[in-house]
Image (cartoon, grey):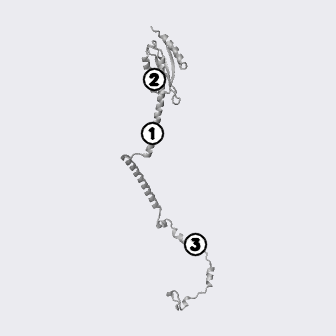
Amino acid sequence: MTDYSEEQRNELEALESIYPDSFTVLSENPPSFTITVTSEAGENDETVQTTLKFTYSEKYPDEAPLYEIFSQENLEDNDITDILKLLALQAEENLGVVMIFTLVTAVQEKLNEIVDQIKTRREEEKKLKEKEAEEAEKQLFHGTPVTIENFLCWKAKFDAELLEIKKKRMKEEEQAGKSKLSGKQLFETDHNLDTSDIQFLEDAGNNVEVDESLFQEMDDLELEDVEDDPDYNPADGGSDSTE
């Protein structure tokens, strides 16, 4: 007859010796304990971690122990699901022998795989971003391929903008025409225009200074009366007839 209590007690002692810093007893009846499992450091010294809780069933190891994820760090929901499936598989394969060490070792390897997957996922994301950046750069140089649809869309927008420019220009020309008055319109607008020129001439005349000495000097000039000259001929400009 199998002494389940003895086998369980011996395994507990062995587990405490193997995992001195991560093994914690929760209760003695039924025997329940936790073991914290941490992955190896990843690329940036990052790790993933889970604390497994085990409870011996009455007939363990002929029956599988109860297990659950007690806590976790940096694990996704799908990672938790994968770990629980792994524990179920390992427990079924190891019925009849103490198996906690085997279960913990399997989870340890799974956590290491998850860290590697994180590294691979980041590399793929990096490559994807680089590819997207290259595609965006190509678009800048090559532009958008012209199709009938986008050409018609562009032309409709261009025609609308051109129409707005023409309307604006016609409005400006119309306003400019209204602001340019004819002479008659200016006269009708300002009735002082008829007297303003006369007043300007009067003011100008009053301000003209005459040098009277110039006329005094002309009195000293001896001028002959050309009309009394018998040789004066208006037709030939006063040329001497004796020549």
Q: Which residue is mark 1?
A: 132
**In front here: 5 or 107?**
107
**In front here: 93 or 240?**
93
Of pointers 2 and 1, the one earlier in the residue sequence: 2
Question: Dot 1: few (<14), some (14–19), or many (≥20) neighbours within 10 Å?
Answer: few
Point out the frontmost of discs 3 and 2. 2
**In front here: 58 or 221?**
58
Residue type, label 1: Glu
**In front here: 171 or 206?**
171
Name the residue: 44% across, 22% down.
86
> CA separation, marks 3 and 2?
112 Å
Residue 27 visible (yes or no): no
Name the residue: 45% across, 38% down.
131
Question: Dot 3: few (<14), some (14–19), or many (≥20) neighbours within 10 Å?
Answer: few
Point out the frontmost of discs 1 and 3. 1
Question: Quadrant location of residue 124?
Answer: top left
SS at circle 1? helix
Q: Which residue is mark 3?
A: 204
Q: Quick check: 156 left or right of 76?
A: left
Residue type, label 3: Ala
Contact between labelled residues 1 and 2, with CB atoms less than 8 Å apart: no
